[in-house]
Amino acid sequence: LFFTSTGRSCGHPQSNKQVSIMAKVAFIGLGNMGGPMAANLVKAGHDVTVFDLVAAAMDAVVAQGASKAATALEALAGADTVITMLPAGKHVAGLYLGDEGLVAKAADGTLFMDCSTIDADTARRVGEAAAARGLQMIDAPVSGGVKAAQAGTLAFMCGGSAEGFARGKLVLEGMGKNIFHAGDHGAGQIAKICNNMLLAVHMVGTAEALQLGANNGLDPKVLSEIMLNSSGKNWSLENYNPYPDVMPTAPASNDYQPGFMVQLMLKDLGLAMENSLVTQSSVPMGALARSLYASFSSKGNAQRDFSSILEMFQP
Ligand code: NAD
């Protein structure tokens, strides 16, 4: 049917991952995230054809065994699954919609998965256009960043039908480990912006609390340990301490090399704010976090790790 069932495991010899179903995947958008994600699908035993507007972006994946297409529509030929990893909603709408778009040109039975972080409205629009053609589409934005994309440990938050999700999960398992079904079209994007808005809020809160302690002469390591064992414990404090030299593996201890860039956090907060206007939601903490990140970004910090927001609070 849609997948070639091999009836056997077809894991790549270099990979620990084993899949019992092989998909014929068209993967479009091979940037910082899409490149390693597509490479992991090759390693997992899928038959992958790639396309990116920037020819050089395809080289690393082709070297690992993917085929190269000259256009997005050429990549589509023979594919049962299409995955896109593009910068923003306008790129996704531009590629999928219209007479020459992927939705119009794909074969019957094609499954679309858009893993880009985009506005939920565009995700719904493209999902509904696919459904009108009888095709399954899921929005499947990721949490984890480039390291997780390389390691194949991304989390996917998916929106779309239960049937589309069940099909997509088999392929997503080649690129990640926590794969959630959040609801209908667009629900994956909503889950993503809720998560990242909360991440921004607790990162800013963690940074200001640590700096307040430091301003009073406390050792940030000691204060971190106290808060980790008290009610201030949170993910940023536990895994991504923003104060330099508290946590050797955190970007703060490596001159705030990303990690997760300020400009990407600002993009996600912008999506959250746009959605709050549409849904008339009150998001005061998210709005303040967006404003702080916008100010900080404009002062030459756009490409630093998002935990560098701590410097805003330093005397
Ligand atoms: P990127 O800019 O590195 O890559 C995007 C790629 O898409 C580029 O190679 C570009 O040439 C290609 N592209 C654009 N339009 C195209 C088209 N019409 N056809 C073919 N290729 C096209 O971006 P990235 O860092 O890989 O991020 C991709 C998405 O993942 C974004 O939506 C981002 O918000 C999200 N995301 C990124 C991270 C991260 O840490 N980088 C983490 C989570 C989510």
Image: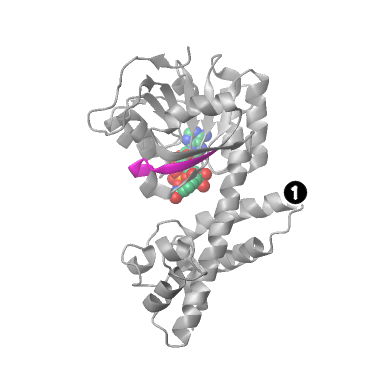
**29 w.r.t. 314: above or below:** above
| Local SS, label 1 | loop
- Going 42% across and 43% down the picture, which residue do you hit? 154
Check the image and name the residue furthest to the top. 1
Q: Residue at x 38, y 81 (%)?
A: 219
Q: Is residue 89 magenta?
A: no
Magenta stretch containing residue 152, yes or no?
yes
Classify mark 1: residues with Cα within 10 Å, few (<14), some (14-19) or many (20+).
Answer: few
Side (left or right) of 270 relative to 226 = right
On whether ligand 1 comes within 8 Å of the CB at mark 1, the answer is no
The amino acid on which the numbered mark 1 sits, given as a three-letter code, is Thr
Horizontally, is 93 left or right of 299 in the view?
right
Give the residue at mark 1.
279
In the figure, residue 244 lies in which quadrant?
A: bottom left
Picture coordinates of residue 201, whole percent (x, y): 57, 63
**Between 56 and 184, the one nearer to me in the picture:** 184
Q: Which residues are magenta?
A: 149-157
Q: Is residue 61 left or right of residue 285?
A: left
Q: Quadrant of residue 223?
A: bottom left
Counting from the top left corner in percent of width and height, residue 282 is at 73, 58
Looking at the image, which residue sits at the far bottom?
A: 217
Front-most of 100 and 158? 158
Position in image of residue 166 (x %, y %)? 51, 26
Res. 101 in view: no
Which residue occupies 39% across, 48% down?
A: 146
**Looking at the picture, does residue 214 appear above or below residue 207?**
below
Q: Quadrant of residue 38?
A: top left
| Percent x, y of residue 120 | 64, 41
